[in-house]
Image (cartoon, coloured by chain):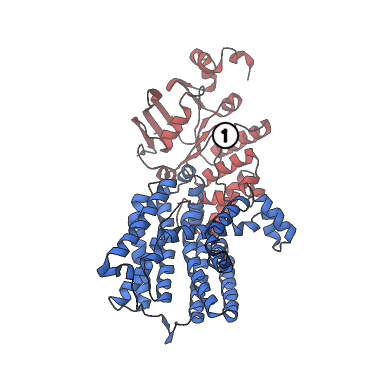
Amino acid sequence: MSLLQATEIAKRYGGLAALADVDLSVGEAEFVAVIGPNGAGKSTLLNVLTGLALPDKGRALLDGWDMTRAATHKRVRGGLGRTFQHGRPFERLSVLENVMTGAAIQSGRSELELRERAMAVLDQMGLAAEAQLPIGSLSYGHRRMVEMCRALACEPRVLLLDEPAAGLNSAEVDQLVDRLTDLRTKHRIAIVLIEHNMGMVMRLAERIIVLNFGCKIAEGTPSEIQSDPAVLSAYLGEGYRHAGV
Amino acid sequence: MSIRVPLLVGAVILIAGLTLSMLLTDYHLRLLNLAALSAIAVIGLNFAFGYAGLISLGHAAFVGAGAYGVALLTTLFAWSPWLALPAAVAGTAVLAMLIGVPLLRLKGHYLALATLGFNVSFSIVAANWIEVTGGTNGISRIPELQIAGHALTDERSYLWFALLVLAVSAAVAALIHGSRHGRAMIAVRDDETASSMTGIDVPRVKLAAFVLSSVYAAVAGGLFAFHMRFISPEDFGYAHSITYLAMLVVGGEGSIVGAILGALLVTFLPEWLRFLGSAYLAFFGLFVLAILIFLPSGLAGIRRPRSFRRHGLMKWPALVAASKEARP
């Protein structure tokens, strides 16, 4: 039984089928990547999974719990975490306070405990030195890391990441890859990654799902996807195999 | 946040207020009393507007609910003032919850208009339900508060009591600000979607901020009734809601110290500028505009830049630089 299971998810916006009968299943501590051209429905899929958009059809289960119509905060309390495409930390709170809002997911924790948990997450992600700073003083890359720390402080079992590498330089991407690997291996967190950086996707993902015009056109291991003719023509490009990324 | 900040805020209010109460004339003590009661209401409004970003133009109606609550319970039912006050505050909280559930589904300007409508309705009911509220004649003969046999009838002793309540209100507000609940309210104003994605129940946090703000308003209203010992609908018209909002904006939204400074300044400004006559309102409009342009985070925002805040003492050039930095 998989941890996160979405079946036959369909979502239309007006005349546009943003998602048409898409299935997704993620096992415990599994790393799944969702790729596809812009407008393929990747972010809509995350919105449906997190309850920011309700599907027209289909069901979403989190560890057996039918969360298809549940409010977003209930899904988060059930173990679902997410970061946004451009990073959305709380601007009027400090770095530490941002992460403390996440740690408050369990009621009954003292302020001291919230602080300690938040510091532990910041430490783990390499942001401890910046704990007291206002969000506005951080670089773009670090703002996005704060958002990821906040999501981790909610103690997710499945983490949905929407283009976490966008806007990061190559050193930052390498760091991100190491940290995501740690999350999966040491903390047993399952990860669903939406990403255009194919180098990163191929290094991390155990399984890749390819969307195009709202439909799943392929699913498989990185090497299967890289040689799938439908994927090459829709997204990766015919030259991809020879570029040796 | 440690317990030190709330204690400090409370202590400063008490010491400054007690010193002033020894120096001022009766008339100015009366104004200071009104400023202290307004400050309690504005600290409340700060929860809804300053933290959670709910634009409420109905705050004066909650002040009125508290005031009419104690006035009716003490005059009609002859309750003890000390019993009437918590009962009126609790009643106002229930009222805020009942109207908050439908109203808080609205956002931004729509919420502002709906709360304004609530305030206008309150005034109409208070002015026309003559058997209960006495209509525009209001309610008189509200009993005075007594502490250990000493009646709080003169301005000075009432001020001491009001300052004590203000100090406690400010300290409690500072505690909430530094808690998970305060952070949740601020998070909701910053980004509702990201808040729900952090496990925050957004509608519930909004309702909590709204009800909390009404509780502070009701305390201020109840104390206003015991201070004036006469209330009428015009004390709680929507213009007063706008004044509370102006106090918060001038003082600095999102800041408890700002709420108190704003209440003080906006209460005393008409006195200092009495020579302007009816031109005062025009001046006040320009004054608020100037605050919005040059000090968008209000009087409290003068100390906002962190480099200055940390070193405590501030010199005049730093003050000027800070005001420049605070500009958008």
Left or right: where A185 falls relative to B119: right
Percent coordinates x, y for residue B64 in the rendering: 38, 65
Q: Is residue B122 above or below residue A3?
A: below
Of residues A208 and B315, the one nearer the viewer is B315
* Residue at 57%, 58% in the rendered image: B283
Of residues B119 and A38, the one nearer the viewer is B119
Q: Inspect this view and state whether residue A2 appears.
A: no
Residue that carries the numbered disc 1 in the rendered image:
A164
Residue located farthest toward the bottom when viewing the structure as drawn = B149
Left or right: where A189 falls relative to B293: left
* Residue at 51%, 52% in the rendered image: B186
Left or right: where A172 falls relative to A163: right
Percent coordinates x, y for residue B75 in the rendering: 31, 77
Quarter of the picture containing the N terminus of chain B is bottom right
- Element class at badge 1: loop
Assess disc 1: are there few (<14), some (14-19) or many (≥20) residues with their C-alpha within 10 Å of its C-alpha: many
Kindly indicate which chain is depicted in blue in the rendered structure: B
Q: Is residue A222 above or below residue B141?
A: above
Percent coordinates x, y for residue B117 in the rendering: 36, 53
